[in-house]
């Protein structure tokens, strides 16, 4: 009985060390964290306020809504899909939730069930749009990016239209105090939004790394053919990831609406780049099969640092557009580079 | 099974035409202004810029790529034209935006071919970058265009309005390139099966690059026609026209999976989309539902494409024994 | 073989002493053959005998390590496929290389359209139409040059491919398994065309498993076995049985571990009347618990397709499947697995494994509930323990089970991971499609040992293999499949000796009419 030892193919060893060191950094789990530190060091001379407690607290609170929606996006990217509709889900959930609980003509105005009812409605909106996306991909054989572009356009328009039935102004205000407390409240000094985001992150981490569903998600993303032959319900797994993404976007919507104290149909409009940028720069691959919640946390941190520093520098909207567009492009290039490095190792 | 599939395929492939007839009848019944000849002329004039854009998009879709940056490209080239080419005669202006658009297409194409990044993410990033640059250059102001350009909209040659003329020229050129040149036929081959095309010795990368350049070029020209029609551009200019262009192509039978479709179909798709918008306008529909309708049309078009592709794949499946000893 | 001909003219193509190694493994040991203008040479041999490598060298895809080729008496050593084409070698592959979305004429000229003038890049439509009409007439294809290829049948597409080759005025045309998906009428038409090509002085090399076709078409036959010449000669001097005898020969005996158990009485898998147009026709068989049923068939015979249908991966139009007496209606991979079927696919890289994942992650993918702990979450320790114990069972080093990515393993070890992944489910029926392809001798022995263990435990095994030695060494019974139909069934004969008649199996697998009696196959099924 002689066991044949596995033969390691370590071609990487033969490479020049400089190349190898760079490759190792790019492939490292903490690449984005290093990037964050480098970025901080680079901008610190221009915006020393970056390292004050006040700004740090701001960074933290800005991170939370983005983190939740980015975590949902992580699930979809791991199955090699993409969900561009999250911004529209946030907007649609915002106006639907607000229309349920607003004091002026809300469906549940004044009822003790107003707040839970509104939150439930928002989650249902997220799940429903996620289901539409997922079913279109699995049943109708549509590429996910174009499905979600179409649903994004549709529900962004629908949110604005919906608002016209519930408010004379451009958004639905007069929300109950119980709801706005989500953004302001804290438990033992920890903001409620942070608690929610941490809960989502922990649940998502456990799902991806420990649950049967998580294993299925990675398998589908890495090799749908092999996954199917191994008994993974491929179509159902894809559907579920889109629904998770929708639900996460709805939770983000809850956070934004309570912070702004109004249900605006354009609340999500401008964060698409931040969501995709954060997840991809974090290291989750556009090619599927690879991604972690922790990476997305780092990616969101990087994006929020970028955002905060640019605001402190007084950059205009267009500068932010250019830089974030550049970040996505860069992140996608790094992703491709990583993919190629992995293929040759 | 095969006969059923073929029937479904036939139905799917003709769905846009059925939709067009249904729309004509429906809008015609709702308003007697809709079926007037003058209105059709209007529809075609309105459809001209989208059609030009969509013709460029067709080249990119034929090789199974996509360009989401054409709307932003229009805005940037228009801004550069308004800011730095004041007082030039219109042909110089047209050349400027066309070259500018082509250069943007070249950048897209280079990133896609050289770095191997998925085209939708490259062009999505470019969308924001180009729009940001344009807003930076223009400082988000409304930019006005001189009469030399806006007069074009009132000009006609042999009774054909300039917008329609521009569209016809682009259409004719694109048709000739796609159907009568070696390059055009090779575009179809690359889109059908890039691996087989490579094996057949075709320069796949160069063809891909050229398609992105053509999409950019058409964005420039389509943008110029739009400018002549509206006379001024602001930060919302060109927003989401890429969707209209994609929808026009896909409705006209161009597949997102590459290799299938033609510019004639694309032109039909552009007219269909403008007919919808025109009809909604004429029956005084709630303006808020316009984007909803457009999005629904895109969705429908892509769903048809997805199902059709799946059926075609099934029909093309290799067999190991003859289906029948006929 | 040329000796018998009076050497009036030198041969069109003369090849001598070709050798070729891949990764240090020699696959060709001095192959030589010659082809005269206007003659057809049949090239036959089992899978892996060196036919493809020989032809890929002729087609410029590979370069030989040694040996020489003469084309028209001039040294010929193509550096790439382009050079081979220009030298006049045309290769009609089994997988046709046409673009169905283009017309016939466009396909013929896709890599070099004639232009109307040097300056304007417009296709000279009139010229390509004329030339296409001419080429189509040469292959007797009565179609308009502007017909889209998507509308053509397989046979018509093949003729278009031949027309494409003719457009380059070839000296030699290589046909690789040209008749696989053709109807009888299309085959007859193809043979008529080949006869005309010969009459025009073109040399034909015809590769096929269908030996009767080879005998119809070819003037000479060369038989390869294990990368070396096994025989050949003029058609008149050969017979199908003689060719089969040369193909099979007697290769190095692999030692198969002895098995102590006999198949049990109960049937583990019953397949009845399984049919799908274009893929399978009325396939019926059963496997008993503790039995190894070998499935012999040449590439493209429908072996893998049959396995995929049973496992619920491909649809079938008609037929019944039952596992351990329970019917398996409309199987999907999930229901097939629940019924107790396991499936090791032919292509381990693209269908069997998640290459970028660890050994443990791959192994537990099929049995996640078994490694779940509290709250139904996957228990990392259980995953590793389960994988480690399975690694011991399949003789895979246990050291790196949790952190070695399978893409870093050798082919043999990768295969053990796939096997282990299925063994964790303790399958009642294990379908193994080419389980020893591309793995070394040691790993092969391990696979044989595992198969024995499986049947000793009472599982049923459906073994699909291109290596007839392997089927003979391991199977209790062997069925042969050809063009989607069962063509023969063989029982192991008791007592010493190989247990099976290799030549009879080869004959049935190549579809020679002898074994094509329906009743015969039903009896053994």
Image (tube, rainbow, N blue to C red):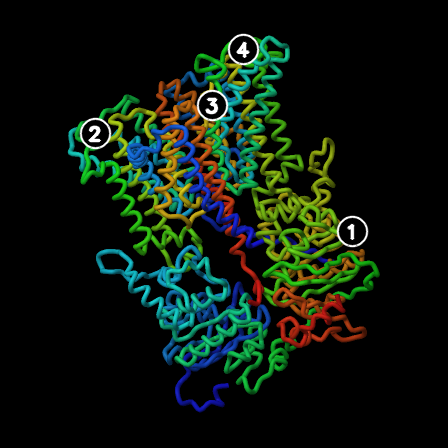
Q: Position of residue C150 (x, y in %)?
A: 45, 57
Residue beneath disc 4:
A105
Crowding near pointer 1: few (<14 within 10 Å), some, many (20+)?
A: few
- Asked which secondary structure carries label 4, the reply is loop
Q: Which residue lies under the disc numbered 1?
A: C326
Q: Do pointers 1 and 3 mark residues of a single chain?
A: no
Residue hosting label 3: A268
Q: Disc 4 and disc 3: Cα gap in Å?
A: 24 Å
Q: Is residue A272 above or below residue C44?
A: above
Disc 2 residue crowd, few under 14, some 14–19, many 20+, Cα 10 Å? many
Question: What residue is rendered at 31% in x and 25% in y?
Answer: B135
Distance between mark 2 and mark 3 Cα atoms: 36 Å
The chain letter under disc 3 is: A
The residue where tag 2 is placed is B150
Q: Position of residue C160 (x, y in %)?
A: 43, 66
Side of A284 where C486 appears, left or right:
right
Q: Are marks 4 and 3 on the same chain?
A: yes
Using a 10 Å C-alpha cutoff, classify the residue at mark 3 as few (fewer than 14 neighbours), some (14 to 19) or many (20 or more).
many
Location of residue B265 (image quadrant): top left
């Amino acid at each position: 009985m002689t066991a044949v030892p596995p033969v390691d193919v370590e071609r990487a060893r033969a490479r020049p060390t400089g190349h190898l060191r760079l490759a190792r950094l790019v492939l490292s789990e903490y690449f984005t964290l290093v990037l964050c530190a480098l970025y901080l060091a680079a901008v610190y001379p221009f915006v020393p306020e970056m390292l004050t407690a006040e700004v740090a607290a701001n960074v933290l609170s800005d991170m939370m809504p983005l983190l939740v929606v980015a975590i949902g996006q992580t699930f979809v990217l791991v199955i090699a899909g993409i969900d561009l509709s999250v911004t529209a889900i946030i907007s649609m959930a915002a106006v639907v939730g607000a229309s349920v609980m607003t004091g002026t003509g809300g469906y549940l105005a004044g009822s003790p069930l107003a707040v839970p009812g509104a939150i439930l409605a928002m989650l249902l909106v997220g799940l429903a749009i996620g289901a539409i996306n997922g079913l279109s991909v699995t049943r109708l054989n549509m590429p996910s990016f174009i499905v979600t572009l179409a649903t994004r356009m549709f529900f962004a328009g629908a949110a604005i239209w919906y608002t016209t039935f519930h408010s004379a102004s451009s958004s639905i205000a007069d929300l109950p105090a119980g709801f706005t407390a989500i953004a302001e409240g804290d438990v033992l000094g920890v903001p409620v939004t942070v608690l929610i985001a941490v809960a989502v992150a922990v649940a998502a981490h456990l799902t991806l790394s420990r649950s049967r569903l998580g294993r299925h998600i990675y398998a589908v993303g890495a090799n749908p053919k092999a996954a199917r032959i191994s008994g993974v319900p491929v179509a159902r797994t894809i559907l579920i990831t889109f629904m998770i993404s929708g639900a996460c976007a709805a939770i983000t919507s809850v956070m934004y609406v309570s912070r702004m104290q109004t249900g605006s149909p354009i609340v999500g409009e401008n964060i698409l780049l931040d969501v995709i940028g954060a997840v991809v720069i974090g290291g989750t691959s556009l090619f599927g099969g690879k991604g972690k919640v922790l990476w997305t946390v780092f990616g969101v941190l990087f994006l929020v640092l970028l955002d905060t520093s640019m605001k402190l520098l007084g950059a205009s909207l267009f500068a932010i557009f250019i830089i974030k567009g550049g970040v996505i492009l860069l992140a996608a290039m790094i992703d491709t580079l990583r993919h190629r490095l992995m293929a040759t190792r | 099974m095969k006969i059923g599939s073929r029937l479904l395929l036939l139905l799917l492939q003709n769905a846009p035409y059925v939709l067009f007839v249904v729309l004509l009848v429906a809008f015609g019944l709702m308003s007697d202004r809709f079926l007037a000849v003058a209105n059709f002329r209007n529809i075609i004039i309105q459809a001209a810029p989208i059609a030009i854009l969509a013709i460029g998009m067709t080249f990119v879709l034929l090789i199974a790529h996509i360009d989401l940056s054409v709307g932003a490209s229009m805005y940037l080239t228009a801004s550069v034209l308004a800011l730095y080419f004041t007082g030039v005669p219109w042909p110089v202006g047209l050349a400027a935006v066309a070259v500018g658009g082509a250069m943007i297409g070249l950048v897209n194409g280079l990133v896609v071919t050289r770095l191997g990044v998925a085209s939708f993410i490259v062009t999505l990033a470019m969308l924001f970058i180009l729009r940001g640059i344009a807003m930076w250059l223009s400082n988000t102001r409304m930019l006005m265009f001189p009469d030399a350009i806006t007069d074009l909209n009132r000009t006609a040659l042999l009774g054909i309005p300039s917008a329609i003329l521009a569209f016809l020229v682009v259409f004719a050129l694109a048709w000739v390139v796609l159907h009568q040149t070696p390059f055009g036929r090779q575009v179809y081959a690359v889109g059908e099966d890039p691996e087989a095309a490579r094996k057949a010795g075709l320069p796949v990368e160069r063809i891909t690059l050229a398609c992105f350049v053509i999409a950019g070029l058409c964005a420039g020209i389509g943008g110029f026609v739009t400018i002549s029609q509206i006379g001024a551009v602001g930060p919302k200019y060109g927003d989401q026209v890429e969707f209209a262009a994609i929808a026009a192509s896909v409705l006209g039978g161009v597949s997102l999976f590459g290799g299938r479709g033609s510019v004639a179909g694309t032109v039909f798709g552009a007219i269909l989309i403008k007919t919808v918008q025109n009809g909604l306008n004429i029956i005084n529909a709630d303006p808020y539902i316009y984007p909803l309708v457009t999005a629904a049309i895109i969705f429908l078009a892509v769903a048809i494409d997805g199902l059709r592709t799946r059926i075609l794949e099934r029909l093309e499946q290799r067999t190991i024994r003859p289906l029948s000893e006929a | 073989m040329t000796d018998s001909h009076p050497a009036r003219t030198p041969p069109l193509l003369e090849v001598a002493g070709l050798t070729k190694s891949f990764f240090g493994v020699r696959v060709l040991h001095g192959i030589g053959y010659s082809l005269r203008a206007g003659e057809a040479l049949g090239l036959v041999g089992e899978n892996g005998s060196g036919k493809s490598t020989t032809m890929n060298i002729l087609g410029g895809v590979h370069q030989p390590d040694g040996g020489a080729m003469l084309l028209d008496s001039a040294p010929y050593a193509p550096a790439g496929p382009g050079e081979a084409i220009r030298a006049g070698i045309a290769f009609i592959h089994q997988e046709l290389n046409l673009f169905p979305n283009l017309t016939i004429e466009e396909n013929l000229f896709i890599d070099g359209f004639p232009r109307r003038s040097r300056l304007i890049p417009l296709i000279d439509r009139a010229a390509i139409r004329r030339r296409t009409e001419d080429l189509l007439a040469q292959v007797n294809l009565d179609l308009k040059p502007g017909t889209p290829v998507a509308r053509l049948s397989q046979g018509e597409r093949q003729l278009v491919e031949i027309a494409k080759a003719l457009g380059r005025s070839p000296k030699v045309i290589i046909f690789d398994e040209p008749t696989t998906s053709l109807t009888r009428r299309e085959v007859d038409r193809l043979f008529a065309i080949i006869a005309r090509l010969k009459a025009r002085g073109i040399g034909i090399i015809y590769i096929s498993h269908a030996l009767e076709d080879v005998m119809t078409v070819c003037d000479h036959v060369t038989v390869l076995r294990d990368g070396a010449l096994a025989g050949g000669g003029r058609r008149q001097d050969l017979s199908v049985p003689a060719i089969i005898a040369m193909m099979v020969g007697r290769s190095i005996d692999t030692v198969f571990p002895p098995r102590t158990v006999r198949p049990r009485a109960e049937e583990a898998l019953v397949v009845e009347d399984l049919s799908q147009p274009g893929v399978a026709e009325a396939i019926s068989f059963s496997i008993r618990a503790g039995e190894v049923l070998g499935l012999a068939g040449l590439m493209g015979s429908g072996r893998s397709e049959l396995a995929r249908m049973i496992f619920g991966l491909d649809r079938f139009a008609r037929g019944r499947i039952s596992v351990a007496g329970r019917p398996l209606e409309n199987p999907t991979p999930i229901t097939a697995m629940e019924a107790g079927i396991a499936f090791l696919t032919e292509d381990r890289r693209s269908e069997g494994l998640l290459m970028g994942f660890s050994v443990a992650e791959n192994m537990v993918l099929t049995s996640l509930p078994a490694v779940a702990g509290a709250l139904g979450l996957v228990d990392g320790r259980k995953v590793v323990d389960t994988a480690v114990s399975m690694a011991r069972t399949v003789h895979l080093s246990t050291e790196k089970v949790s952190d070695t990515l399978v893409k870093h393993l050798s082919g043999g070890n990768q295969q053990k991971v796939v096997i282990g992944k299925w063994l964790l489910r303790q399958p009642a029926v294990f379908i193994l499609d080419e389980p020893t392809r591309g793995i070394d001798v040691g790993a092969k022995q391990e696979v044989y040992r595992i198969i024995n263990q499986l049947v000793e435990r009472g599982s049923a095994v459906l073994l699909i293999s291109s290596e007839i030695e392997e089927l003979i060494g391991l199977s209790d019974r062997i069925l042969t499949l050809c063009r989607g139909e069962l063509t023969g069934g063989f029982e192991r004969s008791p007592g010493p000796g190989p247990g099976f008649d290799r030549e009879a199996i080869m004959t049935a697998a190549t579809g020679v009419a002898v074994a094509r009696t329906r009743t015969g196959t039903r009896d053994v099924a």
